[in-house]
Image (cartoon, rainbow, N blue to C red):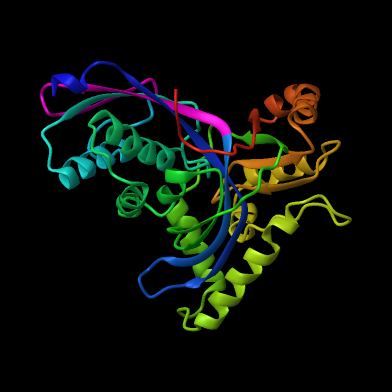
Amino acid sequence: MQDLAKGKIIIKSPAKINLHLEVIGKREDGFHELAMIMQNIDLSDYLEFEINNQGLIKLETDCNDLSVSSDNLIVKSANLLKKKSNNDFGANIFLRKNIPIGAGLAGGSSNAAATLIGLNKLWNLNLDQKTLCFLSSKLGSDIPFFINGGIQLCFGRGEILEKLNSYYKYGVLLLKNPNVSVSTAETYKKYSNRFCDEYLKSNDTIHRIRNDLRDNGLKRLNIGKRGIIIKNDLQLVVENDNDSVKQALYLLSNLKNCLTYSMSGSGPTCFALFKDVETAKKELKANYKLFKDKGYDSWVCNLLEKGITFI
């Protein structure tokens, strides 16, 4: 164990936005069949990992709103990896939190995947990405995406992944009210009650929607005569019930040079795309006071070609 304890591993753990989120239907296992395009953005948490000699998983964070007990996804990920590898190693983990909680940006899922990747290296386990993806799918639906990251098609409940060979240089402007969070489970329940009367039975529908996204997903994200098209089915229920989302979308829709705007995931974070980061920064600078006065935190981010990275 002493040979492994030579240094500290630091990992950059980025958020994601949804460039497409389509709910195909409700499955009999309680999940929903989804067709998504997920994209990493350069709004990131940072995780530091060190070996400890007690064989324990110890988590600390600079975020007072997060539990550091066994219910935290970081701790769950570490314990799952310990059990899988049947080792006696421990780890001290420190989380520097920048991604807002309950925001539709999947910060917790990103942290979980970063923990699997970080401890795999710290403990010299040499597990391949296929194994890490399998383990991550046991922890949550969004987590497998973060093992590879970048931009991917995500099917099933989110665990069926297809890498997309594309890199967009759009700038992203994010808005989120820090006092508002949304429960993903509750949002899917509301969507189900409103739009999914029966369980999904037709595989033909699933294949048709998947193939359409494969064939046309990237085309809809390129600037054309109709502009960029982003679909988020969950926005149909959240926007009506959440004034913060409704107002954020209105503010973004009125920004000069905005190419498109949408809610991310189950919200309440909303975003607008611009032709590049510099244009997005100019819009943020011009509207920062307005956003603040309306109660929103705001960020400008790049789209990332890669996901979780070692520093």
* 265 left or right, relative to 175: left
Corner quadrant of residue 292:
top right
What secondary structure do most residues of the magenta stretch adopt?
strand
x and y, in percent, of residue 120 in the image: 28, 36
Q: Which residues are magenta?
A: 42-63
x and y, in percent, of residue 279 in the image: 80, 29
* 69 left or right, relative to 144: left
Q: Quadrant of the C terminus?
A: top left
Circle count: 0
Q: Quadrant of the N terminus?
A: top left
* 242 left or right, relative to 106: right
Whether 121 is drawn above or below 20: the answer is above
Is residue 57 found inside the magenta-colored segment of the image? yes
x and y, in percent, of residue 190 in the image: 51, 63
Is residue 190 found inside the magenta-colored segment of the image? no
* 291 left or right, relative to 259: left
Whether 38 is drawn above or below 216: the answer is above
Q: In percent of the image, x 38 and y 29: which residue is there?
A: 65
Is residue 203 something one can see in this rendering? yes
Quick one: 44 or 87, which is closer to the camera?
A: 87
Corner quadrant of residue 304:
top right
Q: In percent of the image, x 83 and y 40: which residue is there?
A: 254
Whether 151 is drawn above or below 153: the answer is above
